[in-house]
Image (cartoon, helix red, strand yellow):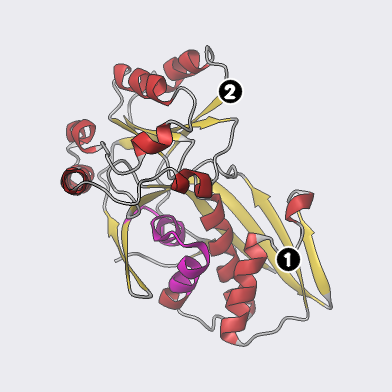
Amino acid sequence: MVEVRVPATSANMGPGFDCLGVAVNMYNRFYVEEIEEGLVFEGCEDKFKNEDNLTYVAMKRCFEKMGYKPAGLRIRIESDIPVCRGLGSSAACVVGGVICANELAGRVLNDQELLDLAVEVEGHPDNINPAFCGGMTVSISEGKKVVYNNVRVKEGIKFCALIPNFTLSTEEARAVLPKNIDYKQGIFNVGRTALLISALNNGDFHLIKYACKDKLHEDYRAQLIENFYSIKEECERLNCLGVFLSGAGPTIMVMLKEEDQEFCKNIQGFLENLQSKWEVKELNIDDKGTVVNNLEQLTQCG
């Protein structure tokens, strides 16, 4: 049996639309073994127990690429990452699938081939890369190849995820984005993306509040998220380092100083007065990324 653990991810990270992402310590676990025949799913909801299951789709694509044909498969999924909340649940399933398939076949594909295949299936390198190698990453697509690097985040920072009880599909969140952007909006985000990376790398956390702003996606998607602006304003009032929409939403991600022991309790009190229910979850950066059989870290970003 192959066992693979994949972390949740928070993409976009303020101004870093479609390029920045960070892995956090919330996980999906995949247990896969070959059986004599058939396809058996365990651990997931009935609606996911079919050939459209994203983990199986990724495995099938990987098997096809390798020319490997298993007689049958048993797939068990233990999921702690909420679905359609902007925390990389799809990326985790795809990464888990391609890694499990490659392990069963005897590690035919190298890390770059696995990464490119996962992005081909899932479509979002800003989630896939940190899920693979952990930490914070910056990613671009160069033709069909994914190019990525790790951002060394200085110690002293943690995250707080504000996770609502309603979902938002990536398709719906993409549909509200404009087809064209203003030149000044691009400049606004480029400068702040560079500043955010520099601030996190150098430990200049006081700069995050200036860097963690966006004009490419957040305002458009805010209309789909009940109380988004009031929650964001309260986070800023409580002296967070920065706050941004996690992925396509609806989760709101907050950056905090490691020693801040009051924020989560205080924001919970605020959220309890809203109509929708919100879970407050304190998180740390996961530096390991995908781990195989409880022992082996898959890869290291350069």
Q: Main secondary structure of the magenta part?
A: helix
**Does 106 sit above or below residue 234?**
below
Q: Classify the position of the C terminus by image quarter.
A: bottom left
Q: Say which of 120 and 45 sits in front.
A: 120
The extreme bottom residue here reads 67
* Magenta part of the chain: 114-137
**Does 268 sit above or below residue 15?**
above
Mark 2: secondary structure = loop
**Residue type at numbered disc 2:** Lys
Q: Which label belongs to residue 51?
A: 1
Q: Which label belongs to residue 277?
A: 2
Q: Is residue 261 in view from this perspective? A: no
Q: Say which of 184 and 133 sits in front.
A: 184
Residue 133 point in image, percent of width and height:
41, 61
Q: Where is residue 231, by image quadrant?
A: top left
Residue drawn where x is 26% and y is 48% of the image:
181
**Residue type at numbered disc 1:** Glu
Q: Is residue 98 in view from this perspective? A: yes
Q: Is residue 117 magenta?
A: yes
